[in-house]
């Protein structure tokens, strides 16, 4: 049973599948690009952000000054520094005393701070995400003094909101995503158009192949189709299939024409026999003779029809592999020789049979097929033999084959005729076979029988010396004891 | 009239020959292959050649071409079992005069052979007229000045042949060749008797009339005008 093909699969064209595949790959790469862009932008922007935080923290540290008081303290004076209003900071001295803090923050104590790996910290301040930098620094107060001033340790926590950074990152990623989408939209139709154009040679080839019919076998693919690597095998395959088809079609047509010729001629004979009889009033004896002639003419017609049917049956029949029909070749040869004894005696030809001792040699053919095969070959041999000569039928057996050779010492077959003897309706010498009632189908039928039984048939002939027909048939599977002698 | 039948199918040839002999009373020679057919045709004594296409030795088309190549104008009727107008066109172009496809009707074959022979001799109508003579080739009847003349088959065939060649001297040999098949020589003695009987019957039909068939001693026979002044020939 044929497999059911999913109709949806069938309707999808190659172009559709290719375009879908390309667009899918494109979409996947767009997504990957967007994610990569996200990572990269985030990294770059936060790096810049951190540098900026450092800069601003440094600026704030720079504002730490000598407080000019008794305890020799330091103080923070940020009057000269301009910081963004959203930024937060806290500055402590070495002993942890708060030096200053931005006005919009309650300080690190009031805010839970999460440290991250890079010495940075995150915090939620005033319901906004902040990135915080903790930095310890030192400050030399009064560097102009002879002892080189006094080194004071200070530390700072500086933070800025991350919102603007994320905004920049998403902006960049959105740009990439939009660009990719646009590309996808533009390339889709472009690919479709290019593919359509690219498949033109295939369509052209299909159109050319579609023009081939039984009346016009012309198929001349353009040179480009032969040279395109993808189309060359297809073109070659179409060409060789067409050539083989044409050959067998021509052969069939010739057969039909020949068959028609044979049948028409045979019918013409019958018809004319009847019409001659009806041309005028005749005596009873004339009518009787005429009727018997008509009868034999009809028999001839019947013979042609029967042989044509047999040929058709043998040629269309599947090889008989299960070995149901297993005729004994030796028995068939002996039986057929006995039947043809009269014909041989009439032609003054003697028939000799040589067969191996032992049990029957069974071949994969029915007994009637075997008899027809042997009868055809022997009749040919007898008809082409000179009076007084011998026709030999030899059977020899090999391991799994049986060989049948029928040899006559007749006039032989000419070299140019030899390749055609198995052709249907071929007559080596038409006048002769017409006279003997041959249809030109005997050898074609023989060949079909042999081939159906899985064997081979060949003819060797030399003009003036005689002809040998060699048949090789495989022994049927169900074989009875192997003959000891050959 | 004498017909050459080239046909390799023996039974068909037998039937055709029988029909042509029994129907229009032609003499028929048979050849079973192309080469024999060609040999026979070279005798130039046929009024028609019936030719099968598929022949051993030499096929019908080649025979036809050979025939026409040596300027043989004998009408040729082709018998064919082939199908398709292409081969028919080819045949007619090669010089065939007519064709019949197998299996054919014998009546049609006979009618066509008669027409071809008539045409080959330059007569368009199946009734031949000369002087007071009227020969109906379909009914095979002869009238002289309206009076029916009863002739034997051989006498009729002699007269029909002469009617096709009025005023010309027809040699006895030619007459024999065209009225009998290949063993015409056996008939050479009886032909004079047949001509003599024919002349008598024609004269008896209209008493007092001048002789119609003249015997030219040593040369043959001639269908002469009844009255020397009569300018009418055939139709």
Image: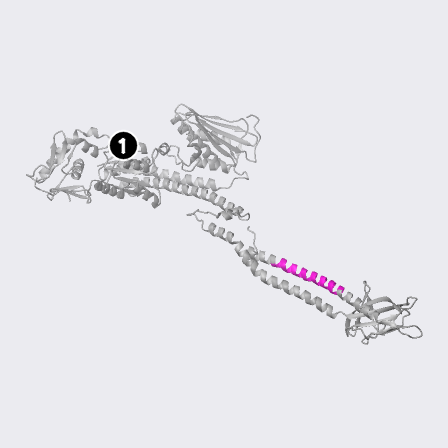
| Residue B137 place in picture, x, y as percent | 19, 42
Q: Quadrant of the C terminus of chain A?
A: top right
- The range drawn in magenta is A23-47
Residue A411 against residue B88 in the figure, above or below: above
Q: Is residue A26 above or below residue B178?
A: below
Q: SS for tag 1?
A: helix
Q: Position of residue A268 (x, y in %)?
A: 32, 41
x and y, in percent, of residue B217 in the image: 12, 30
Q: Nearer the viewer, residue A191 or A231?
A: A191
Q: Is residue A30 magenta?
A: yes
Q: Nearer the viewer, residue A37 or A436?
A: A37
Q: Is residue A32 left or right of residue A407?
A: right
Which residue is pictured at 61% across the width and 59% down the height? A23
Task: Please state the total of marks drawn on the protein image.
Answer: 1
Could you say which quadrant of the image residue B231 lies in? Answer: top left
Q: Is residue A383 magenta?
A: no
Q: Of helix, strand and loop, which mostly describes the magenta segment? A: helix
Residue A240 at what x, y percent from top left?
49, 44
Q: Nearer the viewer, residue A467 or A219?
A: A219
Residue A219 appears left or right of A115: left
Q: Quadrant of residue A152?
A: bottom right
Instruction: Determine the chain carrying the residue at label 1.
Output: B
Q: Which residue is mark 1?
A: B40
Crowding at dot 1, Cα within 10 Å, few <14 / some 14-19 / many 20+, comes out as some
Residue depicted at 68% across the width and 65% down the height: A173
């Amino acid at each position: 049973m044929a497999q059911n093909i999913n109709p949806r699969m069938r309707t999808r064209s190659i172009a559709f599948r290719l375009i879908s595949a390309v667009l899918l790959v494109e979409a996947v790469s767009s997504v990957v690009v967007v994610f990569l862009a996200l990572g990269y932008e985030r990294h770059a922007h936060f790096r810049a952000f951190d540098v900026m935080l450092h800069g601003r923290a440094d600026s704030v540290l720079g504002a730490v000054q000598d407080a000019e008081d008794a305890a020799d303290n330091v103080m923070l004076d940020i009057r000269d520094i301009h910081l963004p209003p959203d930024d937060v900071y806290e500055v402590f001295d070495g002993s942890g005393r708060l030096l200053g803090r931005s006005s919009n923050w309650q300080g690190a104590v009031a805010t839970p701070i999460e440290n991250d790996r890079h010495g940075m910290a995150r915090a939620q301040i005033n319901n906004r995400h902040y990135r915080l930098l903790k930095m310890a620094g030192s400050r030399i107060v009064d560097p102009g003094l002879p002892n080189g001033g006094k080194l004071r340790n200070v530390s700072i926590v500086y933070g800025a909101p991350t919102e603007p950074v994320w905004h920049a990152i998403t902006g960049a990623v959105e740009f990439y995503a939009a660009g990719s989408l646009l590309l996808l939209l533009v390339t889709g139709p472009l690919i479709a158009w290019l593919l359509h154009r690219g498949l033109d040679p295939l369509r052209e080839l299909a159109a050319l192949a579609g023009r081939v019919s039984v009346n016009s076998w012309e198929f001349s693919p353009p040179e480009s189709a032969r040279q395109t690597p993808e189309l060359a095998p297809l073109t070659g395959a179409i060409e060789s299939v067409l050539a083989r088809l044409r050959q067998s079609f021509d052969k069939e047509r010739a057969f039909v024409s020949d068959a028609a010729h044979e049948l028409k001629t045979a019918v013409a004979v019958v018809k004319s026999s009847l019409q001659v009889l009806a041309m005028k009033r005749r005596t009873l004896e004339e009518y009787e003779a005429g009727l018997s002639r008509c009868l034999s003419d009809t028999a001839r017609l019947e013979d042609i029809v029967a042989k044509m049917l047999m040929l058709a049956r043998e040629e269309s029949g599947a090889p008989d592999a299960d070995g149901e029909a297993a005729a004994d070749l030796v028995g068939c040869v002996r039986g057929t020789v006995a039947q043809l004894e009269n014909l041989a005696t009439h032609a003054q030809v003697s028939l000799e049979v040589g067969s191996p001792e032992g049990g029957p040699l069974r071949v994969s053919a029915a007994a009637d097929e075997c008899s027809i095969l042997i009868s055809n070959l022997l009749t040919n041999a007898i008809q082409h033999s000179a009076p007084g000569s011998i026709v030999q039928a030899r059977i020899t057996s090999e391991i799994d084959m049986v060989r049948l050779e029928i040899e006559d010492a007749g006039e032989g077959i000419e070299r140019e005729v030899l390749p055609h003897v198995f052709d249907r309706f071929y007559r080596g010498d038409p006048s002769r076979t017409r006279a003997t009632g041959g249809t030109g189908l005997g050898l074609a039928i023989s060949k079909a029988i042999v081939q159906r039984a899985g064997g081979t048939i060949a003819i060797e002939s030399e003009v003036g010396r005689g002809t040998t027909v060699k048949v090789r048939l495989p022994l049927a599977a169900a074989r009875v004891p192997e003959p000891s002698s050959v | 009239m004498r017909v050459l039948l080239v046909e390799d199918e023996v039974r068909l040839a037998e039937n055709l020959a029988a029909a042509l002999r029994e129907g229009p009373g032609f003499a028929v020679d048979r050849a079973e292959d192309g080469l024999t057919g060609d040999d026979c045709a070279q005798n130039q004594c046929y009024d028609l050649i019936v030719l099968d296409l598929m022949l051993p030795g030499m096929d019908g088309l080649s025979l036809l071409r050979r025939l026409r190549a040596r300027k043989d104008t004998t009408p040729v009727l082709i018998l064919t079992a082939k199908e398709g107008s292409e081969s028919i066109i080819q045949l007619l172009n090669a010089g065939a005069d007519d064709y019949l496809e197998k299996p054919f009707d014998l009546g049609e074959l006979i009618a066509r052979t008669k027409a071809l022979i008539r045409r080959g001799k330059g007569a368009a109508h199946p009734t031949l007229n000369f002087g007071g003579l009227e020969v109906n080739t379909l009914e095979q009847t002869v009238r002289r000045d309206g009076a029916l003349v009863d002739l034997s088959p051989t006498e009729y065939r002699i007269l029909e042949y002469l009617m096709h060649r009025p005023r010309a001297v027809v040699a006895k040999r030619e007459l024999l060749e065209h009225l009998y098949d290949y063993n015409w020589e056996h008939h050479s003695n009886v032909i004079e008797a047949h001509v003599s009987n024919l002349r008598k019957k024609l004269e008896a039909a209209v008493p007092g009339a001048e002789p119609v068939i003249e015997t030219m001693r040593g040369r043959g026979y001639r269908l002469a005008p009844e009255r020397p002044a009569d300018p009418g020939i055939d139709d």
